[in-house]
Amino acid sequence: MEMTIKEFNNAVSKQVSFLYEKAMLYTKNHQDALDLVQDTMMKSLSNFHNYDGCRNLRGWLYVILKNTYINQYHKRKNLKKYKSSKEISDYMKRTSLGSFYPTAYSNIELEEVMAEVKQLPKIYYLPFIMHCQGYKYEEIAQKFDIPLGTIKTRIHKARKMIKKKLKKLPSYKYYGVIQ
């Protein structure tokens, strides 16, 4: 049964209270739960074409909510582990790197890291940046219509190239710069 985007939007809107209840179980905070629900709604609408209309919509939305929470949790965990919130806030004000900062941590300035990342050949740069922004390997492979193994290899090689270049910088002190 094919749904129009309008029908899909109406069906999804009816699930907001369910999603909010589940989000509260994860976040334990009203505002965070609302943000999680909003992210889930946006992802569901942008992935409307992936919903076949036969599956349980509530279950499909719940999986999106859960995966979104898990991804956000891991990003926050990395941020707390390697940077103070003030450092992150200051950095985000200075740059527009989006989600890159959770993967780079050390005494090296992130600008130095990004300068090296931007020098990567395009075949490594684009998959690496997408991966740092939270895209899964499978999503990147689909976007570029390239085998999954090739994407994994390119991201791995990008990390190795960046590490090698960063070791040559005077400010480099190895603490595991690129995961």
Image: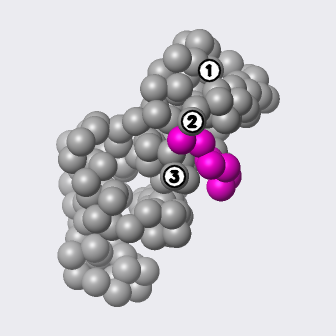
Q: Earlier in the sequence, mark 1 or mark 3?
A: 3
Tell me the chief SS of the magenta region.
loop
For the point 38% across and 68% down, the residue is: 84
The residue indicated by pointer 1 is 124
Look at the image and tell me whether residue 54 can be seen: no
Q: Secondary structure at mark 3?
A: loop
Asked whether residue 92 appears in the rendered view, the answer is: yes
- Figure check: 36 above or below 156: below
**Label 2 amino acid?**
Pro
Residues shaded magenta: 171-177
Residue at (26, 58) in percent of width and height: 89
Amino acid type, callout 1: Tyr
What's the residue type where badge 3 is placed?
Asn
**Residue position marked by numbered label 2 in the rendering:** 170
* Image quadrant where residue 109 sits: top left
CA gap, disc 2 to disc 3?
11 Å
Q: Secondary structure at mark 2?
A: loop
Q: Which residue is mark 3?
A: 107
Label disc, if present, on residue 89 of the rendered structure: none
Q: Which label sits in the foreground, 1 or 3?
A: 3
Q: Residue 10 magenta-drawn?
A: no
Q: What residue do we see at 68% from left, 19% from top? A: 146
Q: Is residue 135 left or right of residue 150?
A: left
* Residue at the spot 44% in from the left edge and 63% down from the top edge: 83
Q: Mark 1 vs mark 2: give the one in front.
A: 2
